[in-house]
Image (cartoon, rainbow, N blue to C red):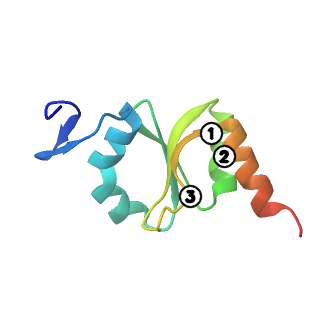
């Protein structure tokens, strides 16, 4: 079990997909360059940066990216980020933009 996982910078992490691993590698750079913005990582690469979740979703739709790791850089990610499928993004947008 000790060898199970990914080693990044001398630290072992449990297995994740390539987007989680890429995020860990990019985290310091993302915080330096994109603090407060939303970013998307797909295929192990940074694929989109936007000011809002809605704008990020629009870029991802335009690029036809169906699955990615999204992060609100420098913000506590309680409930945000992780693997998103389009239904999850659309539900989040609907819940934040619907008048109550």
Q: Is residue 54 left or right of residue 46?
A: right
Give the camera-side residue of 44 and 84: 84
Disc 3 crowd rating (10 Å Cα; few below 14, some 14-19, many 20+) is: few
User: Sequence-wise, which precedes: disc 2 or disc 3?
Assistant: 2
- Of all residues shown, which one is farthest toward the left? 10
Question: Measuring 43% from the left and 61% from the top, which residue is drawn there?
Answer: 34
User: Sequence-wise, which precedes: disc 1 or disc 3?
Assistant: 1
Report which residue position mark 3 lands on. Answer: 79
Q: Is residue 73 left or right of residue 16?
A: right
Question: Foreground mark, 2 or 3?
Answer: 3
C-beta proximity under 8 Å, tags 1 and 3? no
Disc 1 crowd rating (10 Å Cα; few below 14, some 14-19, many 20+) is: many
Q: Secondary structure at mark 3?
A: loop
Q: Position of residue 1 (x, y in %)?
A: 18, 31
Q: Secondary structure at mark 1?
A: helix
Q: Position of residue 15 (x, y in %)?
A: 31, 34
Q: Quadrant of the C terminus?
A: bottom right
* Number of marks drawn: 3
Q: Quadrant of residue 61?
A: top right
Q: Position of residue 90 (x, y in %)?
A: 74, 45
Q: Position of residue 4 (x, y in %)?
A: 20, 30
Report which residue position mark 2 lands on. Answer: 57
C-beta proximity under 8 Å, tags 1 and 2? yes
Q: Check residue 60 in the rendering and tell me which mark sits there, or answer none.
A: 1
Q: Quadrant of residue 44?
A: top left
């Amino acid at each position: 079990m000790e060898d199970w996982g990914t080693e990044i910078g001398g630290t072992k992490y449990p297995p994740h997909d390539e987007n989680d691993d890429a995020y860990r590698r990019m985290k310091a750079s993302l915080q330096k360059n994109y603090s407060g913005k939303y970013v998307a990582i797909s295929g192990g690469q940074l694929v989109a940066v936007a000011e809002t979740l809605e704008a990020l979703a629009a870029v991802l739709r335009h690029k036809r990216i169906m699955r990615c790791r999204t992060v609100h850089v420098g913000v506590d990610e309680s409930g945000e980020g992780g693997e998103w499928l389009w239904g999850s993004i659309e539900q989040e947008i609907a819940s934040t933009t619907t008048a109550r």
